[in-house]
Image (cartoon, rainbow, N blue to C red):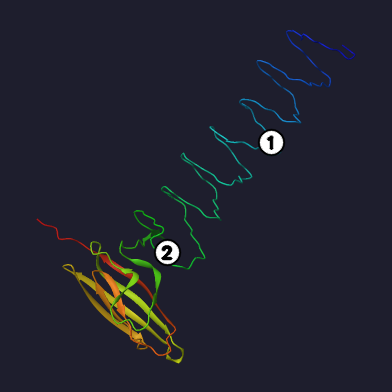
Amino acid sequence: VTGASLLELGVSAGSLNVTGESWLQGAVTAGALNVTGASLLELGMTGGSLNVTGESWLQGAVTAGALNVTGASLLELGVTTGMLYVTGGSDLSGFLNVSGGSFFQDDLTVTTANVIISTNDFTPILNDTSASGGSILFNTVDVSPSLGDISREREFAAANNVVSAQSITGFSFNNSIVRSFDAIVSVTIYAGTNSSYAYYNLKGVQKAGNWVLNSSFVGDVTGFTFSIDGGQIKYTSTDVVDYVESYVNFRALTTTFKAQQLP
């Protein structure tokens, strides 16, 4: 056919070979479509499923409701996504950089590599996050804390002229876990020319359910007195002239409570 032609009822043939440029303004319905040469789809393609068994190149972008990859895949230039969910086992052999907020709702296991955690958050984290494991090793040395340790420094805003002993938030030891502790404490009182600064060393031991506390200090006489009640550290303070504010900063090492082993 060399001129314009209209086939109203269709063409039936064993094979149809078109060697020149062709335009199809309607639709094609076929049991299978096999394209062996280079092809260009300028307006897109809609299908129930797309199966690509050979190597493929995509120079533009893909927009999809869901992408399921069941075989081995290689992403050489990276993946950019709003959210990435990995529900199965995953193997990361390269570098993982997480710069935004991240949540690990299950276990994170690192067997042979290093874990580096850096942050600009200097506010103490209390009862918000936790990590558990058998041990923490640095250069083959086990530096795991005891369960009752206060490893990260905590801060408490104290008050002036506290006559009845008040609890210091976050400064407590579990009676069923801790046998003894050695705590370092700094007290800072801002009161103009009456400001004072001191370093305290608090040592405590649990004896048959009762706690014994020893306190020593260097620096100024701050008027702070520390006590312990059921593992909770408390304080009183004197009335300071021109008082503005005061802070108690602390951390502690502990030894573990060991119950008697009956024969």
The disc placed on residue 58 is 1
**Mark 2 residue type:** Ile
Query: Splitting the image into 4 quarters, where does residue 208 fall?
Result: bottom left
**Mark 1 residue type:** Leu
Point out the tag, 1 or 2, that comes first from the N-terminus.
1
Asked whether 260 or 140 is in front, the reply is 260
| Picture mark count | 2
Residue 72 spot, x, y in % from top left: 55, 35
Q: Dot 1, crowdedness within 10 Å: few (<14), some or many (≥20)? A: few
Indicate left or right for 58 with 118 as reference: right
Q: Residue furthest right?
A: 3
Q: Residue furthest bottom?
A: 193
Q: Dot 2, crowdedness within 10 Å: few (<14), some or many (≥20)? A: few
Query: Splitting the image into 4 quarters, where does residue 183 fall?
Result: bottom left
Residue 246 spot, x, y in % from top left: 41, 80
Above or below: residue 112 compared with residue 140: above
Q: Nearer the viewer, mark 1 or mark 2?
A: 2
Query: Splitting the image into 4 quarters, where does residue 42 fall?
Result: top right
Residue 123 spot, x, y in % from top left: 46, 68
Above or below: residue 49 compared with residue 247: above
Q: CA distance from mark 1 to mark 2?
A: 46 Å
Tell me which residue sits at (28%, 70%) in the image: 232
Q: Name the secondary structure under disc 2.
A: loop
Residue 9 spot, x, y in % from top left: 77, 8
Image quadrant occupied by the N terminus = top right
Tell me which residue sits at (88%, 15%) in the image: 4
Check contact, mark 1 vs mark 2: CB within 8 A. Answer: no
Q: Residue furthest left?
A: 263
For disc 2, the marked residue is: 125
